[in-house]
Image (cartoon, rainbow, N blue to C red):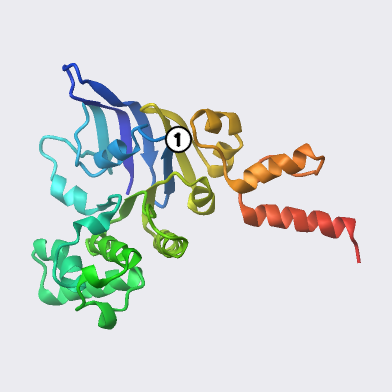
Amino acid sequence: MSIQLKNLTHVYSGGTAFESVALHDISFEIRDGDFLALVGHTGCGKSTLVQHLNGLLKPTSGQVLVDGEDLNGEHVDRRKLRMRIGLVFQYPEYQLFEETVAKDIAFGPKNLGLSAAEIEERVRTAMAQVHLNYDKYARRSPFELSGGQMRRVAIAGVLAMQPKTLILDEPTAGLDPHGRDRILGIVRELHQSGTTVVMVSHSMDDVARLATRVVVLAHGSLLADGTPREIFRQREMMEEAGLGVPEASRLVQALRARGLDLPDDLYTQDELYDHLLRLWKEANPC
């Protein structure tokens, strides 16, 4: 499944004294199998953009095409297209409301008119995907859980709809390091199992570890689109966008400035470690 943005523009309060252009002439494609990181400074339009991807917002001009169909077309089955694109907002645990974990996760599938057996199967599968044991947690109140567990319940509620593309707006916001690692590990597993992922993030280290592609926004416009290696080697551009680069990339530049022979496009800790180990072995042969 592909999602294509064509000349997408969104203006809030158009024609008034409070008019604000949130997005201007954005065009790019989310391809099947992508892990696309959407990055940019606060207020650059990231959250506005992701709300267009499943039709929560309508463009002022331009199009969002899902497998070639205009999401906002006059005769399109918007509900059917939305089912294929799951959106997880920031702090999704604030939207939990049912008396048990299982009932909360089942809310979406139940509204599809599925059988009780199918609903239970979807709940079980979604809970397994977010590493929550069904027998232990299904009948508990979601409000008795930790913050990280509540967030996983909220994500499971989206996964129970079986989307082909999962969009996450700052999925680790407000979590402690352990909770962050659990959520990011789950997102990685979902991508590896075939789900297309779009993730809004301010952490360039998370982006470096997970993304296959990076789209950079600045002041509502598309600034850059490429692989992490292509994006992170443009350090001046990233700094001007208020983002910086991963820690490993900064360390590479510091080591190169001291005369160490390292490629200038290393950006993950693992590949930096491998290069440093190789250099050490060359300098210290057995």
- Density class for disc 1 (Cα within 10 Å; few <14, some 14-19, many ≥20) is many
Residue 102, percent from left and from top = 19, 73
Residue at 27% x, 66% y is: 153
Question: Could you tell me which secondary element the residue under label 1 belongs to?
Answer: strand
Query: Which residue position holds label 1?
Result: 216
> Quarter-wise, where is residue 200 in the image?
top left
Residue 136 in sight: yes
Is residue 71 toward the left or the right of residue 191 in the image? left
Towards the viewer: 252 or 54: 252
Residue 122 in sight: no
Is residue 100 toward the left or the right of residue 34 in the image? left
Residue at 20% x, 49% y is: 82
Amino acid at circle 1: Val
Is residue 60 toward the left or the right of residue 254 in the image? left
Outermost residue on the bottom side: it is 135
Question: In the picture, which quadrant includes the C terminus?
Answer: bottom right
Residue 70, percent from left and from top = 21, 37
